[in-house]
Image (spheres, rainbow, N blue to C red):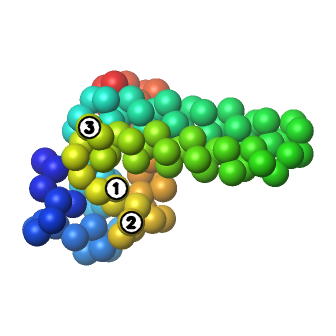
Amino acid sequence: MNTTTAPGSAVDPRRFKSFAEFYPFYLTEHADRTCRRLHFAGSTLSLACLVALVVTLNPWWLLAALVAGYGFAWVGHFGFEKNRPASFKRPLYSFMGDWAMYRDIWLGRVKI
């Protein structure tokens, strides 16, 4: 499952023409449970930082949200999934995939 972003990969995430095509690929890039858990934790922390931004109007919370979200996700990919995040080649679809997977975890469609 992790061959899609490994060196010499056969699948380039830029080939997908729609998010509907991309999302199943995105899920295969998150086969490792620890990676999914780190994504979930980072997304939850990002949301908490965005709430803090709105409450305090301190722009540093926006930076904290980005660091939390991407930091946890990248640790999951490099440390556990052993692949490169698709965000390097499809940033918008990957961002959308993060939140679709977050929703699907809450709905019980994706296990953590």
What mark, if any, has residue 85 been given in the picture? Answer: 1
Disc 3 target residue: 80
Residue at 33% from the left image edge and 36% from the top image edge? 35
Q: Position of residue 46 (x, y in %)?
A: 62, 40
SS under mark 1:
loop
Tell how many labels: 3
Disc 2 target residue: 88
Say whether disc 1 or disc 3 marks the residue closer to the N-terminus: 3
For the residues bearing labels 1 and 2, Cβ distance under 8 angstroms:
yes
The quarter in which the C terminus is drawn is top left
Amino acid type at circle 3 is: Phe
For the residues bearing labels 1 and 3, Cβ distance under 8 angstroms:
no
Which is nearer the eye, 97 or 20?
A: 97
**Residue 26, placed above or below residue 103:** below
Q: Does residue 71 appear in this view?
A: yes
Amino acid type at circle 2 is: Phe
